[in-house]
Image: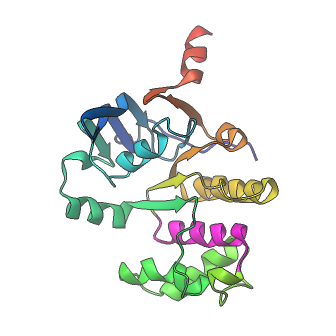
Amino acid sequence: MNQMTNVNPDSQSPMLRVDNLTHRVSVETDTLTILQGVTLEINRGESVAIVGRSGSGKTTLLGLLAGLDTPSEGTVELDGSVISKLSEDERAKLRAHRVGFVFQSFQLLPALTALENVMLPLELAGMASPEKRARELLERVGLGERLTHTPRQLSGGEQQRVAIARAFASEPLILFADEPTGNLDNRTGQAVSDLLMALNREQGTTLVMVTHDEHLAARCNRQFHIEAGVLTEPEAAQEMAH
């Protein structure tokens, strides 16, 4: 399972390029710096883990990389578009066509079945044969027998697999995952990790996740550590030393 994604760093521009990203928030009379001078590049098809303790700034960073928020300073370029300079509507349109999300809390619609949850983004995007595509993906994640079940009738691991099927349904160029195994037991978390890595390889989707899970992080092409809003890549330093 340790097979790496085939990454061609020369194929056009990087999928994600971040330069001197800084994010501050005002708290009463003070200003709090959440992220400080973050610079990184992520190639197309890579799997990248951002590891850090609670409060280190990793979820804030993920939101900025995905265009859910705008930085105080610096730029975020996603698939050639400087999203940090786009309007909220322009960012939403870009996310709809190029970005997938998997959250720790699953964020499925409780009144819809597994099949309907996966079909919804396909229908909104006007994709042909949304039901066929949704069925194929749910079978791929091992839920072919659970299509008509609502989230309440599914275990945590099953709900997360529906969320992963939904995220990959529109064939995003990049998938952001926020603690995708955080609410799962070890065995279920391992199965979800296997699934994310397999889909990363099969579809060539760039995968960027924040996680406490060191085992999941170790399976990615690259790992970054974040502490007090400062991002470092420990492996890079070791490679330069050799």
Residue at 35% in and 42% down: 12
Q: Is residue 124 above or below residue 178?
A: below
Q: Is residue 202 above or below residue 216?
A: below
Residue at 64% in and 67% down: 160
For the question of whether residue 205 can be seen, the reply is: no
**Residue 21 locus on image (x, y percent):** 31, 33
**Magenta stretch, residue numbers:** 154-171
Q: Residue furthest bottom?
A: 148
Q: Residue furthest right?
A: 187
Residue at 58% in and 58% down: 104
**Residue 178 locus on image (x, y percent):** 53, 52
Direction from residue 79 to residue 197 in the image, left or right: right
Locate residue 47: give its quadrant: top right
Direction from residue 48 to residue 156 in the image, left or right: right
Q: Is residue 165 magenta?
A: yes
For the question of whether residue 226 can be seen, the reply is: yes
Direction from residue 214 to residue 10 in the image, left or right: left
Residue at 52% in and 25% down: 233
**Residue 120 locus on image (x, y percent):** 46, 82
Q: Would you say the magenta stretch is mainly helix, strand or loop?
A: helix
Direction from residue 97 to residue 52 in the image, left or right: right
Q: Nearer the viewer, residue 127 or 29?
A: 29
Q: Is residue 70 magenta?
A: no
**Residue 63 locus on image (x, y percent):** 39, 50
